[in-house]
Image (tube, grey):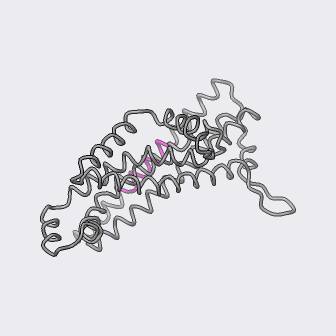
Amino acid sequence: MKSHKKHQQINKTILIDIFKFIFVIALLCWMTFRGTEKLGYNWQWFQVPRYLFRMDDTGFLSGPLLNGFIVTLKITAASMVLAVFSGFITAILRLSNSISGRLTAFSYVETVRNTPLLVQIFFIYFVISPIFGISPFISAVFALSLFEGAYISEIFRAGILSVDKGQWEAAYSLSLSTFDTYFKIILPQAVRKILPPLTGQAVSLIKDSALVSTISIYDITMEGRVIISETYLTFEIWFTIAVIYLMITATLSVFVNRMEKRFKIAA
């Protein structure tokens, strides 16, 4: 009986939360439309689909926003892989006994974290890129991975330090190498604490990738700016881009949440 009442209370709470969410969304939509109405803006949502995709006699054709979306995914995926790698190496260096390694890692982290990402993108694109003949795409990936890697290194370092010292002592007593200690003992335990902040950093990377449009990379943000300059569909295009970014980050969050649950079950 108590279980049934508790279940009913949970369902009631969920329904209330859903109504609250719908109310907030409706209020935001009303404020948006009311504000644009005061500006005398003429909504033309019917024009947006053709900038995403269209169908003709040859079949499916992707529009500029969809093409930009694919570029954004490529840049984000490549940058995230490199950022995790560089972040992990930096964290290991900061925890090592090597003075030069700790100093190098500390200098990298503090320099990157205390300078704007846009300045770093410009430096790599206008200074480093011409010297080594690097393409704009590689320059963007390099800049984003270095920037996010500095933050990810601190996430890894905090996760590694959270593991009980007894685990290290047990690994040393078994004569495990440093490599085996990290990958067989420490990281499997630290990953549960690393995943949530790492997800937040991945979401930040996805949003930060919009800055690569400043170096003429036709990601979704750049494609949106071009469309707006030609059509003046300002609100429609920016809102569409915002929804696409939201879909990417929400999908990532759901995926990581499922991974966290699996790790908890395994633990």
Residue 169 rendering spot, x and y as whole percentages: 12, 67
Q: Number of callouts in the render?
A: 0
Q: Is residue 183 left or right of residue 128?
A: left
Work out which quarter of the rendered image holds the C terminus and state it.
Answer: bottom left
Which residue is painted at 27% across and 62% down in the image?
Answer: 190
Which residue is painted at 24% across and 53% down in the image?
Answer: 95
Work out which quarter of the rendered image holds the N terminus and state it.
Answer: bottom left
Q: Residue furthest top?
A: 39
Residue toward you, 80 or 104: 104
Residue 141 rendering spot, x and y as whole percentages: 54, 49
> For the magenta stretch, what is the residue range?
14-25
In this picture, is 159 found above or below 234? below
Residue toward you, 138 or 2: 138
Residue toward you, 258 or 205: 205
In reply to whether residue 107 is colored magenta, the answer given is no
By secondary structure, the bulk of the magenta-drawn segment is best described as helix
Which residue is painted at 76% across and 49% down in the image?
Answer: 50
Residue 105 rendering spot, x and y as whole percentages: 32, 46
Residue 184 rendering spot, x and y as whole percentages: 27, 72
Q: Quadrant of residue 234?
A: top right
Residue toward you, 258 or 158: 158
In reply to whether residue 23 is colored magenta, the answer given is yes
Q: Is residue 247 left or right of residue 47?
A: left
In this picture, is 145 found above or below 211? below
